[in-house]
Amino acid sequence: MFPACRYSLQARRCISALKAVQVEHVAPQVYSTRCSSSTVPRITTHYTVYPRDKDPRWEGVEMERFVDEADVVIVGGGPAGLSAAIRLKQLANQHEKELRVCVVEKASQIGAHTLSGACLEPSALSELIPDWKERGAPLNTPVTEDKFAILTEKYRIPVPILPGLPMNNHGNYLVRLGHFVRWLGEQAEELGVELYPGYAAAEVLFHEDGSVKGIATNDVGIAKDGSPKDVFERGMELHAKVTLFGEGCHGHLAKQLYKQFNLRENCEPQTYAIGLKELWVIDEKKWRPGRAEHSVGWPLNRNTYGGSFLYHLNEGEPLVALGFVVGLDYTNPYLSPFREFQRWKHHPSIMSTLEGGNRIAYGARALNEGGFQSIPKLTFPGGMLIGCSPGFMNVPKIKGTHTAMKSGMLAAESAFSKITDGNLQSETAGVYIPEYEEAFKKSWIWKELYSVRNIRPSFHNYFGLYGGMVYTGIFYWILRGKEPWTLKHNGLDSASLKPAKDCTPIEYPKPDGKISFDLLSSVALSGTNHEHDQPPHLTLKDDSVPVAQNLTVYDGPEQRFCPAGVYEYVPVETGDGMRLQINAQNCVHCKTCDIKDPSQNINWVVPEGSGGPAYNGM
């Protein structure tokens, strides 16, 4: 192993200490602001908004961190991060090199924050681990039947899936992605990768020359009012020659890096969707293992991008995974993605599958939809972006795991050859690896994303969904993306909402408790929990903005676009007016609020490690 620095023993003690102060979760807490007062009480108490060096309560508190060193530090134990870690150790073993690789993951267990459909294309997996079948990879359900349809309120219009169209899933597998990620973690550990689940990367560290030095994990033992508890412990610093950021969609450290290194200078803004998902155990007579169903249309109108999936899994019981995706460039602030999902389940063709079944899990996650046009610069001194953090999802395929894995492998190969070069002369303290971006542009990821680059933006037309489908049928199926133009997206999702006065409120049916359900009972199925006595990680740049701007102009859209009931506007206790209530303990880490907030006043940061959802194979 690569020799650790002089602090490594202390760092390991620090890890033990951090585990000791991960205290028991308790009941929810409310944070509020009053619009009836000229002085707005503080909602946000997080140190990223109110620095501790200006807070007298922190005087005399020991703030030195323990330090450890590795060759490569990877932020995020998802498909991209674990594929990078595995590839690095494969190369190290092949070339008989000592290489220390550390992966930090905010979830309490590897895979516990992973949520996807998921229909997995195994191309990258076969490259990374050719004998994955013999090793017991949990790919138990090959796709045997593809179905696609346009839904109206009462009818289902079948659409043929022609060979070569993105929705053709021949050769793919229906998987529970959290279980697959957990298996990847096991493969990584067998190779000697150090995995640290339950430790969130809270801060990017920089050398004096501005290059990335590594990351710092989150502090623990901070009270909800921002003061230090008796059990306060600083996080630890992990330094590396190169740091890979694979945080997933809309990573909070990646947001900082985009600004620090101007990585989005030559690309369009990223555009997103929110995906909501449930697992059901259904009547065995209705179970068709290997069937993959997709639909577009109702209950969304033609100008709201979205669709659904219903996958029949072969996991030893009659299990189906179903979900609903809504593009976050929608315009009506009254739209609720969660309630659209619940309404969709009442379509006759969907309800017939679910009747008599039992819902066992729920979750939600934002996903990248910008594709080729929105790929940022991927390399910078001391670091690289991999996976869904920069956004490599193939939108018409509704697949991003294979591209995320491949990007991690490319980053690993580029990093290995550079940091093991005995004659390496780096101009910066953190190693700069432009070879990764060069390899990426020569890879099949680049070709794949380029070929479908115009499908998502083609939906921005008068005919919406139907115009986009016609475009796909003509230009993708016939020309395979070789048209000599590239369409543009419509800008930031946060800027797409119209004022509430210009929109019609949407009347949603009440949940029946059998097919459709209320929000809080759904969140309960996600296993979500956070340490109560900590500063809320949904931070506001200005506590007065929610009521003064979002509620006044847009009728408080965050109380509808959040899939976990984190944001509520409720009456003030005395006098007239409304106040914002933030139920931070409900947060499922989907990042939708940070993306869709029309005021861009919400900044999602990591809570204490291990907090958040506890998904089991989502």
Image (cartoon, rainbow, N blue to C red):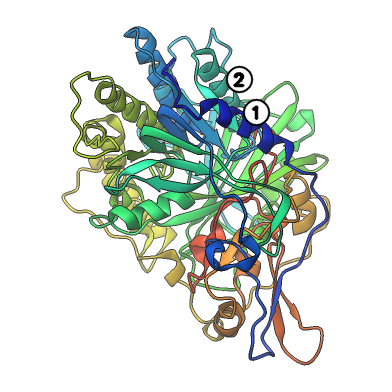
Q: Residues within 10 Å of mark 2 (few under 14, many from 20)?
A: some
Q: Is residue 221 left or right of residue 399?
A: right
Which residue occupies the extreme left position in the image?
A: 484
Residue that numbered label 1 is attached to: 313
Report x, y in % for residue 160: 45, 39
Quadrant for the C terminus, please: top right
Where residue 372 is drawn, which disc sits there? none
Residue found 48% across the figure and 78% down from its top: 498
Q: Secondary structure at mark 2?
A: loop
Q: Camera-side residue: 352 or 343?
A: 343
Q: Is residue 361 left or right of residue 422?
A: right
Residue found 74% across the figure and 58% down from its top: 519
> From this viewpoint, is residue 447 visible?
yes
Whichever of labels 2 and 1 marks the residue nearer the N terminus, that label is 2
The amino acid beneath tag 2 is Asn
Residue that numbered label 2 is attached to: 140
The amino acid beneath tag 1 is Leu
Q: Quadrant of residue 509?
A: bottom right
Residue found 43% across the figure and 42% down from its top: 388
Report x, y in % for residue 437: 24, 37
Q: Is residue 88 above or below residue 203?
A: above
Q: Is residue 134 above or below residue 374?
A: above
Q: Are marks 2 and 1 in contact (CB under 8 Å)?
A: yes
Q: Camera-side residue: 476 or 247?
A: 247
Which residue occupies the extreme front position in the image?
A: 60
Report x, y in % for residue 527: 75, 43
Q: Is residue 261 left or right of residue 343?
A: left
In space, the residues marked 2 and 1 are separated at their CA atoms by: 8 Å
